[in-house]
Amino acid sequence: MTNSKENQEILRVECADAKGLVHKITGVLFKHDLNIVQNDEFVDHENGRFFMRTEFSGRAETKKILDALRPLLPKNAVVELTKSRKKDIVI
């Protein structure tokens, strides 16, 4: 497994909070033979919203991953999958 950013992608999910979301999302990545490099999640309890950002490596087939995730997530979930890249930083 390589540590190169060229094979890394970032998955972002925002949806209504529900039990088991982390398990469902990471399970899809596991089933697609992807390796989670970093994972962060947060629940806005006041508004009942779940946020998750997962960086993973491997050969991801975007459409297959999104098609597998959508039926597992609450209605109106926002799901984004993008390539990882170096960030522009101004000092």
Image (cartoon, grey):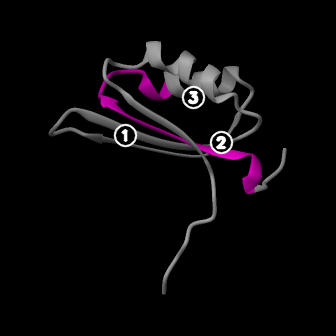
In the rendered image, which residue does mark 1 sit on? Answer: 51
Amino acid type for the residue under numbered disc 2: Phe
In the rendered image, which residue does mark 2 sit on? Answer: 56
Residue 22 x %, y %:
47, 29
Quadrant location, the N terminus = top right
Q: Kindly identify the residue that appears in the image at 75 percent across and 52 percent down.
A: 6
Residue 52 x %, y %:
43, 40
Depth check: give the residue in front, 87 or 3. 87
Q: Kindly identify the residue that appears in the image at 70 percent across and 23 percent down.
A: 32
Residues in magenta, as a range: 5-23
Q: Is residue 63 left or right of residue 16?
A: right
In the rendered image, which residue does mark 3 sit on? Answer: 26
Q: Is residue 74 magenta?
A: no
Query: Residue furthest toward the bottom?
Result: 91
- Mark before the other along the chain sequence, 3 or 2: 3
Q: Kindly identify the residue that appears in the image at 40 percent across and 19 percent down.
A: 73
**Label 1: few (<14), some (14–19) or many (≥20) C-alpha neighbours in 10 Å:** some
Q: Secondary structure at mark 2?
A: strand
Q: Secondary structure at mark 1?
A: strand
